Amino acid sequence: MENREIPSRDQLRRFPYSFLEDQLHWPRTNDYEDSLEFVMLPLPHFDYSRPRNVKEAIHALSRGKRGTRVLAGGTDLLVQMKKGLVRPRLLVDIKHIRHISRISCKSKGELVLGAGVTLTDLEQWAKKRKDWSGLSMASGSIGSEQVRNRATVVGNLCRASPAGDMAPMLIALDGSVGISGPEGKRFVLVENFMTGPGKTVLTQGEMVISVRIPKIVNSGAIYLRHGPRRAMDIAVIGVAVRLSLDETLKRIVCARIVLGAVAPIPMRVPEAEMILVESGVNLLTLQEVSNLAAARARPITDLRGTRSYRLEMVKVMTRRAVKQAWKQLKKKEVDR
Ligand SMILES: Cc1cc2nc3c(=O)[nH]c(=O)nc-3n(C[C@H](O)[C@H](O)[C@H](O)COP(=O)(O)OP(=O)(O)OC[C@H]3O[C@@H](n4cnc5c(N)ncnc54)[C@H](O)[C@@H]3O)c2cc1C
């Protein structure tokens, strides 16, 4: 924190936004605001809409112009509003839309997570299903139980924080985002959904209605995150790894390594993935893969860790995640 005069309670009460503007111009050590100690203010005035279906929601979002936001769990949006970082004129609350809070498996084994599915819903659902254990690791790593009960998986993606915990795992599972808007429906790979810190491909009037994940078989998936504290803090680094074997359970046919919190958006390491497919998991490839991950990462220095510390941790965590995913697969082979 810079050495600036801290406003008194009385000053804050009388001129809250002038102090906020001042804070917003302080030099940032990070691309996102989490590292700054902002003053929490009462929520500003906003209009509220509670659509009953997706069509009504799209209608409200389209007519509301730029100052309109979707409200899902509100664990991020309401905090941002209280910090004065965003001041939407209209909130479109999607929690009351029917059928949007379902987790369903389609006939081809595709998993569909509705936009209202909370982190707790997903964590509990995935815990009982071995194939989806990576999803329970990612959703269970976020915030606290109270936050997870409220926060949605899709809200985590749409927040587009570089350190968001859901995106790396969803990318590793080749997930895609179902978007509805005034022009109709479209699908975008989660990998291409975020365009920068806090930015996504969503355009005016559009909302995400689901996340779809293709069926995965003979796979091991692991999400590991490292942070200064075990809970209630964002990740210094997150790594999602997925390895899929052929039907003989001997050869890796697909590998995904996705890093979070070490670049403006989550990033894959395709060269390392290729090595695992071509040469499998052994001491040499583990070394190569972790070095490649560190070479590709572009972390910053902030109050949670220096750039060089993060680069070292990328190596450690990547190696650990690949080893664990491999171990998970070997266990499946024994169980079969
Ligand atoms: C104490 C605390 C701890 C936290 N810890 C973590 C953590 O460890 N890891 C982590 O990743 N996050 C963390 N968060 C951030 C936050 O909880 C998550 O990002 C959460 O998943 C957001 O989901 P939500 O449903 O609450 O989204 P909201 O707050 O409702 O929305 C977030 C953003 O997404 C947009 N949005 C939501 N749904 C849609 C949709 N369907 N279509 C289009 N736009 C949409 C909103 O307009 C808003 O801009 C934490 C937050 C708190 C308060």
Image (tube, helix red, strand yellow):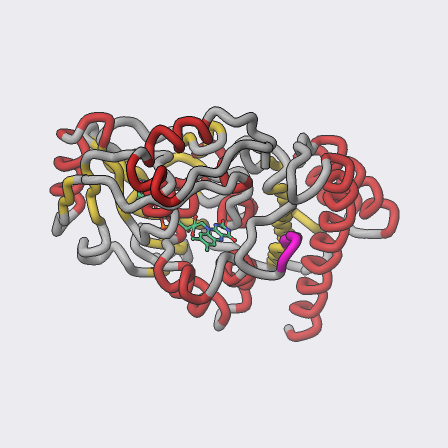
Q: Is residue 235 magenta?
A: no
Identity of the residue furthest to the right in this view = 284
Quadrant of the rendering where the C terminus is positioned: bottom right
Count of labels shown? 0
Rendering quarter of residue 13: top left
Identity of the residue furthest to the bottom in this view = 335
- Compared across the picture, whether 319 is left or right of 336 comes to right
> Which of 210/117 is in front?
117
Residue 32: x, y in percent? 51, 35
> Which of 281/207 is in front?
207
Residue drawn 33% across and 36% down?
16
Asked whether residue 85 appears in the rendered view, the answer is yes
Q: Which residues are magenta?
A: 225-229
Residue drawn 15% across and 44% down?
48
Quadrant of the rendering where the N terminus is positioned: top right
Asked whether residue 289 appears in the rendered view, the answer is no
Q: Would you place residue 65 above or below residue 262 in this image?
A: above
Residue 104: x, y in percent? 34, 60
Residue 265: x, y in percent? 54, 34
Rendering quarter of residue 248: bottom right
- Compared across the picture, whether 185 is left or right of 232 comes to left
> Which of 250/177 is in front?
177
- Compared across the picture, whether 252 is left or right of 266 comes to right
- Compared across the picture, whether 54 is left or right of 313 comes to left
Residue 334: x, y in percent? 70, 73
Residue drawn 71% across and 60% down?
324
Residue drawn 37% across and 55% down?
151
Q: Main secondary structure of the magenta part?
A: loop
